[in-house]
Amino acid sequence: NAGVMQNPRHLVRRRGQEARLRCSPMKGHSHVYWYRQLPEEGLKFMVYLQKENIIDESGMPKERFSAEFPKEGPSILRIQQVVRGDSAAYFCASSPRAGTAFFGQGTRLTVV
Amino acid sequence: LAKTTQPISMDSYEGQEVNITCSHNNIATNDYITWYQQFPSQGPRFIIQGYKTKVTNEVASLFIPADRKSSTLSLPRVSLSDTAVYYCLVGDDNAGNMLTFGGGTRLMVKP
């Protein structure tokens, strides 16, 4: 059973471009979480999704950020018009139920 | 959500037992206690989860006193590869954002 797969592992974008981060949860997992981590800091919750539904987006910035978890395919975290402050590691986790979750290796976004 | 407090950092030596205590005074009746380990440039890895008393697996033990206002992660005979950040999380199994990470404890294992 493959773990949580995130791609790309590294993503470089110029300011103003769009960044799309993908997360394929573990087989059978219907809960997906997205986190952001700055260097030397802890993980900050962004959004919690179940299939086709956003359950909790209290950690998402109000503008430029969006997330989805369609019925088919991976979960997508989309950042429009990226700025340098968006540079961070973005981690996805999945769970068969709310609670114990398994994390991917993350996507490191660098905005130049 | 119950807030957790952990030491910012700890040092230890190879072969020693390490105990990391987490305070969660506002823990609710339905809350579980979960610990994760994170190495640099990697995602957090689930270590152990418990509700009360003691839980043990092949990696660690988790001790939870009767009042559940704290918990202690115990790592037996640490090695250099146990150097990592350890996070204590508390939350309801049914809560959407149970996975709320605090600052974690940075454990440094020395030879």
Image (cartoon, rainbow, N blue to C red):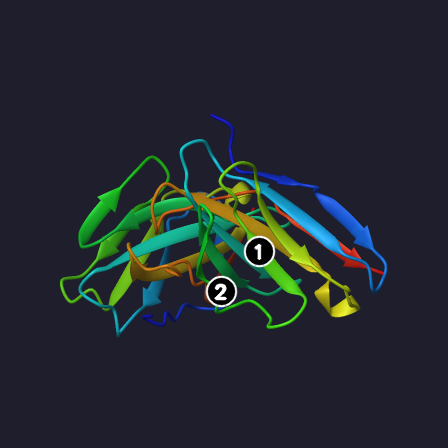
Characterize the local packing of mark 1: few (<14), some (14-19) or many (20 or more) Cα atoms within 10 angstroms. Answer: many
Mark 1 = which residue? A67
Chain of the residue that carries numbered disc 2 in the rendered image: A
Q: Count every numbered label the image shows and give the total.
A: 2
Label 1 is placed on what type of residue?
Ala
Question: Looking at the picture, how far across and down is residue A16, in whole percent?
Answer: 83, 64
* Nearer the observer, A57 or B9: A57
- Left or right placement of residue A73 versus residue B21 in this view: right
Alpha-carbon distance for marks 2 and 1? Answer: 9 Å
Mark 2 = which residue? A57
Q: What residue is at 84 percent from the left and 64 percent from the top? A: A15
Q: Is residue A97 visible?
A: yes
Label 2 is placed on what type of residue?
Glu
Which of the two discs, 2 and 1, labels the residue nearer the N terminus? Answer: 2
Question: Looking at the picture, how far across and down is residue B79, in whole percent?
Answer: 49, 42
Q: Quadrant of residue B98?
A: bottom left
> Which quadrant: the C terminus of chain A?
bottom right
